[in-house]
Image (cartoon, rainbow, N blue to C red):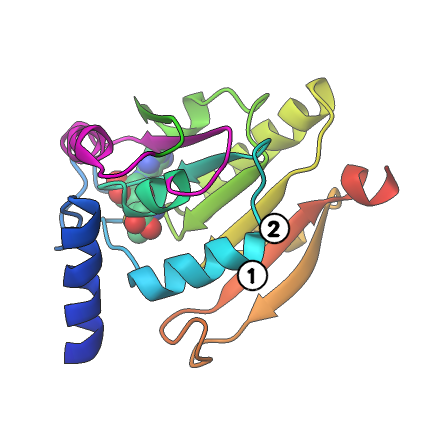
Amino acid sequence: MLFLPEKIENMFWEYRLGIITRGLAGVDTADDEHIHYGTVPYRTINTILDHLQLTHSDVFVDLGCGKGRVLCCAAMRSIEKSIGVECSPSLSSIAQHNADVLRFHHSPIAVLTMEAQQFDYSVGTVYYLFHPFGPETLSTVLEQLRSGVERIPRSVRIVYVNPVHNNVLKDCSWLIETEKWNAGESRSPVHPVTWWQNKIDRQG
Ligand SMILES: C[S@@+](CC[C@H](N)C(=O)[O-])C[C@H]1O[C@@H](n2cnc3c(N)ncnc32)[C@H](O)[C@@H]1O
């Protein structure tokens, strides 16, 4: 639940960026594997993005980008590109509109209307997931990401907000959990956040 100061701060950011991402919405194809739309406060998103220390060569991918709040915030940084993947056509069209009207100079944004399992995992250096899917989809997506990184070797980081199925990542021997933020900390008051990295990067 958000308190009034956070709500006001979120409204301030929406006004500043010229986008509208508030409100909950259903998923057109809702089931146990497709989690409905929701997002986190701008303050938390910006804290996460600061912590990532993104550079101009980063390609930021939000799997299940919803209305594009995180996508737009990432695009305000000097990165190569931000990519949003969203299965709901109504949500992805809102994300595309937000990307089109986003104020200020920003990095390129692509919004793809597709299931995360259809994405080409040979790109992307940072993957952001705010509890978008159930364990089966997550497992498939991680296997696709593993083979994408094998095809095109590179460092990949994963930020998992509200890590309901963190055990699925723990089962991936090619990943290392580098950090965990607990819920209630000032940097992420509502949800825990786990941070992951592929081992290739560690060895390289
Ligand atoms: C909790 S919301 C997160 C939205 C956004 N990442 C954010 O933080 O503002 C989860 C999103 O994932 C999308 N989603 C669920 N399953 C998906 C799938 N298999 N492929 C792509 N998107 C999916 C939902 O439609 C929803 O917009």
Residue at the right extreme, as displayed:
203
> Magenta stretch?
76-105
Q: Quadrant of residue 1?
A: bottom left
On screen, 157 above or below 119?
A: below
View extreme (front): residue: 105
- Name which quarter of the figure residue 188 lies in: bottom left
| Residue type of the residue flagged with mark 2 | Leu
Dot 1: element: strand
Name the residue: 59% across, 68% down: 180
Q: Which of 105/85 is in front?
A: 105
CB of mark 1 within 8 Å of CB of mark 2?
Answer: yes
The answer to whether residue 169 shows anywhere in this view is: yes
Dot 2: few (<14), some (14–19), or many (≥20) neighbours within 10 Å? Answer: many
Q: In the rendered structure, which disc, 1 or 2, sits on the residue that comes first in sequence? A: 2
**Quick check: 31 above or below 57?**
below
Tag of residue 194: 1
For label 1, count other residues whose C-alpha is less than 10 Å away and answer few (under 14), some (14-19) or many (20+). some
Q: Which mark is residue 169?
A: 2
Q: Secondary structure at mark 2?
A: helix
Rendered view: 68 above or below 177 = above
Q: What separation in Å lies between label 1 and label 2 (alpha carbons)? A: 10 Å
Mark 1 vs mark 2, foreground winner is: 1
